[in-house]
């Protein structure tokens, strides 16, 4: 287990070596966390409908996950500032493990409120996963900050794809060991969470945030490696840009399966699930698959231009959805652009927030950003359902353009010189 180096020993090559190790560890942890979270989220709605006996209550599972992440984002971020990223991330893993155990117990006892409580704790664990992208920036040099952050974001793709694929094998294994129906995949989730816990505990040393804080206090932080300036106006813009982009993405994406089901009216259930599955898969690829590209571009051209590029892609997505809402191909293209726009804005916005915030304030602002992002998305998803019923899918897309326009209009207030 590596010993924490002294401040005097932290020259640039040492910091670079710590950063490479940190990014590898965080990326591996995101794969494991994605496997666990992907499986549990997929099962949550099914369990909620089964235990409650009402399909209408299945949406409470997703709401509970979102609420758990929103409620724990700020406390976990503050703990990271006091005790380090390793402490916050492993605590998130513990929340998720406890939540999984409660969900399995609730399924066995068929107690609906207990089920929602367990899912809420799983969401709390996901708050830790969200903060992994910020941990990748603590010691990153300016010219690689966006790239390192985006690598950790990209790693989510692997776990996000593998997790849902484990549902059927998990159910078979669960039956062998006598687990309640629809809970077998949670065995894989528990193993993945335990592996992530051990990985962070053992490999995330020295802690990147504590190391950055130590360098800043000692005055040994180089401008290239430790961004320790305070640009509150720029930081506020970054928080708004990330949150607004997330609301646009989550609102439209959440209503797309319902809209596609209407388009496929008269087709078989298999037709509907196939269309929805392909469309959402393309969307998820847009969200994560090209994130390293956006990170590299943000490092070279600057954060604000990439955020604006993300808004342009979101606008193109929404206009496509509005103009070709009756076409399955049009919706598929819109969802791809929606994922790409979200990715660009999230990667560049997160990097901008980090380098616009001094070390002492960074965990607090990052926690606020994640909390606002998740709370806003939950509210946006509820409003999206109402808007869909009122003026349809095309109308929902046009309403979402208001947020894109707002971020674009605010961008001149946050422009900073592009890194060289």
Image (cartoon, rainbow, N blue to C red):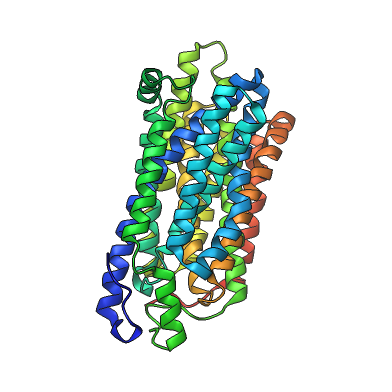
Nearer to the camera, 251 or 172: 172
Q: Residue at x 51, y 62 (%)?
A: 349
Q: Is residue 37 left or right of residue 318?
A: left
Return the residue nearer the eye: 108 or 17: 108
Q: Position of residue 52 (x, y in %)?
A: 65, 21
The residue that appears at 30% across and 70% down in the rendered structure is 18
* Residue 160 visible, this orientation: no
Q: Which quadrant would the N terminus be assigned to in this image? A: bottom left
Residue 214 rendering spot, x and y as whole percentages: 43, 80
Relative vertical location of residue 186 with respect to residue 337 in this rendering, above or below: above
373 left or right of 29? right
Give the percent coordinates (x, y) of residue 35.
Answer: 39, 39
Determine the residue positioned at 50% across, 44% down.
96
Q: Is residue 142 positioned above or below 376 on the image? A: below
Left or right for 126, reference 8? right
Q: Closer to the camera, 291 or 172?
A: 172
- Residue 149 visible within the image: yes
Question: x, y (%) of residue 228?
Answer: 48, 80
Could you tell me which residue is drawn at 31 percent across and 77 percent down? 5
Q: Nearer the viewer, residue 223 or 47?
A: 47
């Amino acid at each position: 287990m590596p010993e924490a180096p002294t401040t005097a020993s932290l020259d640039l090559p040492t910091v670079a070596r710590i950063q490479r190790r940190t990014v590898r560890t965080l990326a591996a942890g995101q794969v494991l966390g994605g496997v666990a979270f992907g499986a549990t989220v997929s099962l949550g709605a099914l369990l909620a409908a089964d235990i409650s006996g009402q399909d209408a209550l299945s949406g409470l599972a997703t709401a509970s996950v979102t609420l758990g992440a929103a409620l724990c984002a700020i406390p976990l971020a503050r703990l990271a500032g006091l005790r380090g990223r390793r402490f916050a991330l492993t605590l998130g893993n513990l929340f998720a493990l406890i939540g999984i155990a409660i969900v399995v117990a609730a399924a066995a006892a068929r107690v609906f409120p207990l089920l929602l409580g367990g899912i809420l704790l799983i969401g709390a664990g996901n708050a830790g996963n969200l903060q992994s992208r910020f941990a990748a920036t603590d010691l990153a040099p300016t010219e690689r900050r966006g790239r390192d952050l985006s690598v950790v974001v990209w790693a989510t793709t692997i776990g996000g794809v593998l997790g849902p694929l484990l549902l059927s094998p998990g159910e078979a294994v669960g039956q062998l060991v006598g687990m309640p129906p629809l809970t077998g995949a949670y065995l894989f989730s528990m193993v993945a969470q335990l592996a992530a816990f051990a990985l962070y505990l053992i490999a995330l040393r020295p802690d990147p945030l504590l190391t950055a804080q130590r360098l800043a206090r000692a005055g040994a932080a180089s401008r290239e490696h430790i961004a320790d300036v305070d640009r509150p106006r720029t930081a506020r813009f970054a928080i708004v840009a990330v949150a607004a982009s997330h609301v646009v993405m989550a609102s439209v994406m959440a209503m797309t399966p319902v809209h596609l089901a209407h388009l496929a009216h008269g087709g078989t259930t298999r037709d509907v699930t196939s269309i929805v599955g392909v469309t959402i898969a393309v969307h998820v690829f847009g969200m994560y698959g090209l994130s390293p590209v956006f990170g590299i571009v943000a490092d070279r051209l600057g954060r604000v231009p990439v955020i604006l590029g993300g808004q342009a892609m979101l606008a193109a997505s929404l206009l496509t959805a509005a103009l070709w809402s009756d076409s399955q191909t049009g919706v598929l293209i819109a969802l791809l652009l929606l994922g790409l726009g979200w990715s660009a804005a999230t990667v560049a916005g997160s990097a901008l927030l980090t380098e616009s915030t001094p070390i002492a304030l960074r965990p607090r602002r990052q926690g606020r950003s994640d909390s606002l992002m998740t709370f806003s998305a939950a509210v946006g998803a509820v409003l999206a359902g109402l808007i869909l019923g009122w003026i349809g899918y095309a109308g929902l897309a046009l309403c979402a353009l208001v947020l894109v326009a707002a971020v674009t209009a605010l961008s001149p207030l946050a422009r900073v010189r592009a890194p060289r």
